Image (spheres, grey):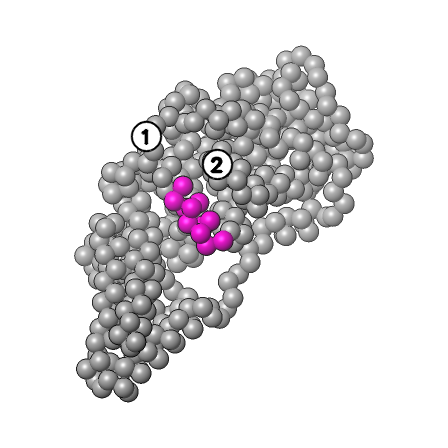
Amino acid sequence: MTDALVAEAADWTDQPHIEIERDGVHYTLLGTAHISKASIEAVRSAIASGRFDAIAVELDEQRHKALTEPDALAQLDLVKVIRERKIAPFAANLALAAYQRRLAEQLDVEPGAELKTAALEASARGLPLQLIDRDVGITFRRILQKLRWWDRMKLIAGLGGGLFASDEIDESDIERLKEGDMLESSFGEFARDTPSLFATLIDERDQFMAARLRERTDGASQVLAVVGAGHLKGMARYLAEETRTPDDITNELVHITRKRKIPWITIVLMLLIAAGIAWGYARGGSELGRELLIQWVAWTGGLAGLGALLARGHILSVLAAAISAPLKPFRPGLPPGMFSALVEVHLRKPAYPDFLALRDDAQTLGGWYRNRVCRVVMVFILTNIGSAIGVWMAGARILGKLL
């Protein structure tokens, strides 16, 4: 193993890059800007040099498909996404796609085009291609589990607001993209003000990508890794100095802390509400008990149904939301939005054009209502928001009646 060596020469080597040799493999980390035509040409020139026998890119499988296969979204199994409770990462991906599209329109450069060029050039020349970035859904879930409830709401609101923004991308965001990280720029000011978020977005991915590079088993001896310039120093340090095995590192960095099997907060809240209703029957007779029960059904079912209605869900989707929300104490692990979204996707099954138009439609509020894929996401999210508000409102009303 040798120390990191920064090389400077002509042509593509004028771009920021670091060369490291480890375990008999010579790695060249080429730092790019995700909105730079010069970076595209640098990548093309480096691969054309014939120096490298393998290419690695800062992409995960999902982002790779999105860049190189325009019809990849049309193969999405939306029912599976709902049942596996991956709506939140899917919605985050839509926000990222909308942000990228706005950048492309403003700057006349497709964000990530240099990564796409690297992947296509590797394929055209028959070179092995390695996707070294962590799945963006895992990154998003690891971010959420490290944030407090209020910070989660701020982040989700910021992503949601970014979806429909019509103004030009801020100059500071463009400058950060020149330094090279799409995800950090997508999260904007929130990333810089939240150390744990920055660590998950940048440092963890530096570790992950360096470990993935060391996993190569195809016998390559000269590897070109095309990554955002913002990852160069961190990746170089971990590639040169990390002593743990690649498997140990990647397994640790894809781990998602599962919620406790027993949702104590939900159970305690439901028990208090149930006890309140029972107390109402015992102290005030059937009339008070019935009134408290109606309060529970009206608030939880009514607001969940209202959420589905605001998303312009099918009338049966609204009904599914209204019926499932009051039954939440009997199925604490299943959100009512899951039921309303499943009804919506079956009754208004997204068509092929909906998937093809997804990235464009995700940029406008009208597009979200027009596109059936987006609308299913809205039904899921707004049903759950309505149900959550309804639980607290019902609890407050029941407590008020008892007092």
The secondary structure making up most of the magenta span is helix
Give the residue pinned by disc 1: 166
Label at residue 189? 2
Tell me: 103 left or right of 366.
right
Dot 1 lies on which element? loop
Q: Quadrant of residue 30?
A: top right
Residue at x-position 75% and y-position 25%: 5
Quadrant of image for the N terminus: top right
Comparing marks 2 and 1, which lies closer to the viewer? 2
Tell me: 293 left or right of 333.
left
Q: CA distance from mark 2 to mark 1?
A: 18 Å
- Between 149 and 10, the residue placed more toward the observer is 149
- The span picked out in magenta is 148-158
Reply above or below: 170 against 82.
Answer: above
Specify the amino acid type for callout 1.
Ser
156 within the magenta span: yes
